[in-house]
Image: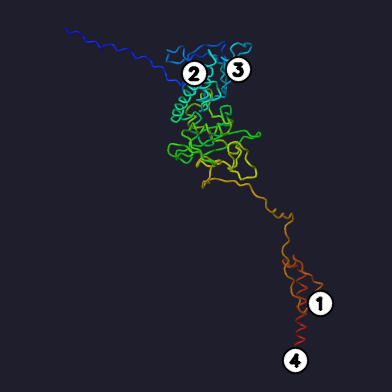
Amino acid sequence: MASTLSLPSIPKPKCALPSHYYENFLEKKGPYDQDYKKFWAGLQGLTLYFYNSNRDSQYMEKLDLGTFVKLTDEAPRGKSHEPGTHFNLVLRSQEIKFKVDSLESREMWKGFILTVVELRVPFNLTLLPGHLYMMAEALAKEEVRRSLVIPSCFLKVSRLEAQLLLERYPECGNLLLRPGGDHTGGVSVTTRQTLNGTPVVRHYKVKREGSTYVIDVEEPFSCASLDAVVNYFVSHAKKTLVPFLLDEDYEKVLGPASLACGPKQPSPTSITPVSSQDKLTPLPNSDENYVTPIGDAPDADYVNGDVLAASRLVVLKPKKCSPAPKVQAKPPKPPTPPKPEARGLPGGLTRKLPVRSAQAFFPTAGLADVTAELEKKLQKRRALEQSAGLA
């Protein structure tokens, strides 16, 4: 009896370690941790991954750098030894403390984090030329990655829905990207800032020309990706604009379907209209014309718009003009009709018979009798004159 052939066993491939821009040991202490915990950490994109060892491919924790605020070199309180081995990562909602083995390791971590967050190589750190070259390579990879990735602050919402999100969740950011209203592949940028105690909402139009995005300002600025568009507004606003990023708690409440469809449209009366002559940060000039947002189809009323849409409602501030004539409190008197001719009547009698406006329209009975009597006398006088002439 022939023996059953058995397939040769194929060894399982080892899990390849993920590709990181930089990786090294890093001790981490979160806001709720009692002490530092040592990890093997790796930086990829805008995420820090933490592993139990450098042989693991599955991370234990991760930290999103999308809400980055700043890095500090503050040493732990009450401990003055090794002050150069500690640094803090301040995010929008929390602060993480890190501890490394040496000053060089600290500067490397800070340099790579700043490179991917700010998209530039930092030259103000204590780094060697070789370190700067490594960061330049990481910067090139990050720019390619972002050109293929849609930013987290891009949401498929309408113009008014974007305004409502920025108004309801100001702690999540004040800059949001959304699809453009002209259906040409461009995008729109909506920002909301509080200037002098007044919330000001602005909309900017970004055109799509081939594979680049063009921000139509005084000097048109071309961006290779949507992330570069976000970085342009953040840097030119001196970081007063923060990309909108919903926290996990809000995402659970809204859900992915709600984010795609968007909440109900708010009333446009709650939004302060802005002059089309303003740029990113200056206050709108109250003496200039302003535009009132009215809807999202077509998507108009951009700060950097140069052509007014046909259906765009432009509300111009009225100029000073001569005051309107005052309305009389009393109704005007009816026009006075011309006085009846009194030819043939004695001058004295004519002066004794003034004709009033009311009597002209509605003659009284007494006046009618007097007129009939005068006509009889006039006829008798004429008859006498005619008979005297014949004689």
Question: Spatial distance from mark 4 to mark 1, Cα to Cα?
Answer: 28 Å
Circle 4 sits in a helix, a strand or a loop, which is it?
helix
Mark 1 residue type: Gly
Precedes in sequence: disc 4 or disc 1: 1
For the C terminus, the image quarter is bottom right
Q: Residue at x 60, y 44 (%)?
A: 290
Q: How far apart are the two marked residues, 3 and 4, measured between alpha carbons?
A: 138 Å
Q: Which mark is residue 347?
A: 1
Query: Viewer-nearest of labels 2 and 3?
Result: 3
The numbered mark, 3 or 1, whose residue comes first in the sequence reads 3
Amino acid under label 4? Leu
Please tell me in which quadrant of the rendered image residue 12 appears: top left
Mark earlier in primary sequence (2, 3)? 2
* Residue with the mark numbered 4: 390
**What's the residue type where badge 3 is placed?**
Glu
Label 4–label 2 contact, CB within 8 A: no
Residue positioned most to the left: 1
Q: Secondary structure at mark 2?
A: strand
Q: Are marks 2 and 1 in contact (CB under 8 Å)?
A: no
Mark 3 sits on what residue? 74
Closest to the observer, 386 or 100: 100
Mark in front: 3 vs 1? 3
Q: Which residue is mark 2?
A: 62
**Residue 363 circle label:** none
Name the mark nearer the viewer: 4 or 1.
1
Residue 97's x, y, as percent? 56, 16
Q: Quadrant of the N terminus?
A: top left
At mark 3, the secondary structure is loop
- For marks 2 and 3, give the CA distance: 23 Å
